């Protein structure tokens, strides 16, 4: 008969299992978010009335997955050249709850966009008629940029990040005494422990940024709050990293605004 000395082994095992599950869950969600961003990004590429070739989608997928976060990268797809920056924010206690954003500039089409994909704990966001309608970048309590010209939305739905599962049972000797080891007076059976499925309210929105390019160029180089506002009034506050804010200013459409402001300041100095 096998006797366990640690009577808290069941709880220890659950903690250990959660730690093992967590990386796999993180990888699965990352793939899910990247796939969603690819679809949103590919919608921005113009191929006339033709469908986007699978080889092109595969190239876009690889480029986005390989690109580092919070740095500008370039994607060439046929005749189209796009500049992009990707960002993520997640809960340290549960990495499956997060917000992923892909900021893109396609100069040849004069398009400046952001695609936002979210996986949030609030179940009310999963209602079929709920969608992300607005995003506000804030410095503390001060609103800096309001982004609300949405082009495409995928309404809220429930996403299963990890299905429910049972943890195998254990034997535990309630009368264990090291003096009698390896003999015990008896054992008790612990039934399998069920770990519930992990779900979130998922969805996505794509916004046109052309009208706010000047405001984006004026953003302070620091981590900003990013308030997500849904059409049913629910709001969630996440963060846009300092590295991403700096990288956004390298996108051609925004860089032109930064250069324009710099030239104006230099002209004013020369007058004085």
Image (cartoon, rainbow, N blue to C red):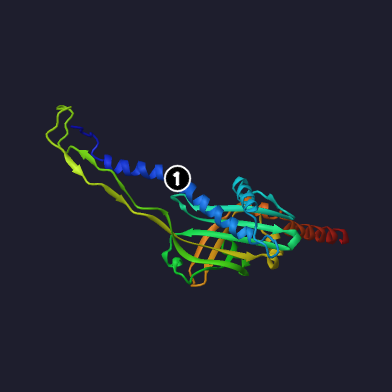
Which residue occupies 49% across, 72% down? 233
**In the image, 122: left or right of 264?**
left
**In the image, 158: left or right of 217?**
left
- Asked if residue 144 shows in the view, the reply is no
Residue occupying the far right of the picture: 271
Viewport quadrant of the C terminus? bottom right
**In the image, 69: left or right of 97?**
right
Residue bearing the label numbered 1:
24
Which residue occupies 14% across, 36% down? 175
Residue 257: x percent and y percent? 75, 60
Viewport quadrant of the N terminus? top left
Residue 229: x percent and y percent? 53, 67
Seen from the viewer's position, the closer of residues 62 and 123 is: 62
Which residue occupies 31% across, 41% down? 13
Residue 145: x percent and y percent? 63, 65
Label 1, secondary structure: give it.
helix
**In the image, 98: left or right of 144?**
left
- Asked if residue 157 shows in the view, the reply is yes
């Amino acid at each position: 008969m096998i006797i366990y000395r640690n009577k808290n082994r069941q709880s220890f095992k659950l903690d250990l299992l959660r730690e093992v599950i967590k990386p796999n869950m993180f990888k699965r969600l990352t793939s899910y978010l990247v796939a969603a961003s690819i679809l949103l990004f590919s919608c921005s590429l113009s191929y006339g009335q033709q469908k986007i070739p699978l080889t092109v989608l595969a190239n876009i997928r690889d480029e986005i997955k390989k690109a580092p976060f919070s740095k500008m990268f370039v994607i060439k797809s046929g005749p189209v050249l796009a500049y992009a920056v990707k960002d993520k924010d997640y809960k340290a206690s549960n990495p499956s709850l997060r917000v992923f954003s892909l900021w893109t500039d396609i100069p040849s089409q004069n398009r400046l966009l952001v695609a936002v994909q979210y996986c949030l704990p609030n179940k009310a966001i999963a209602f079929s008629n709920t969608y992300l309608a607005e995003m506000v970048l804030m410095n503390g309590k001060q609103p800096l940029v309001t982004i609300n010209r949405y082009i495409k939305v995928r309404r809220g739905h429930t996403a299963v990040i990890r299905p429910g599962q049972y943890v195998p049972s254990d034997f535990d000797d309630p009368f264990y005494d090291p003096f009698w080891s390896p003999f015990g007076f008896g054992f008790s059976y612990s039934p399998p422990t069920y770990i519930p499925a992990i779900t979130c309210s998922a969805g996505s929105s794509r916004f046109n940024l052309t009208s706010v390019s000047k405001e984006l160029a004026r953003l302070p180089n620091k981590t900003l709050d990013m308030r997500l506002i849904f059409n049913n009034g629910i709001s969630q506050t996440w963060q846009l990293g300092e590295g991403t804010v700096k990288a956004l200013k390298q996108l051609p459409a925004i860089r032109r605004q930064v250069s324009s402001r710099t030239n104006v300041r230099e002209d004013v100095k020369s007058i004085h």
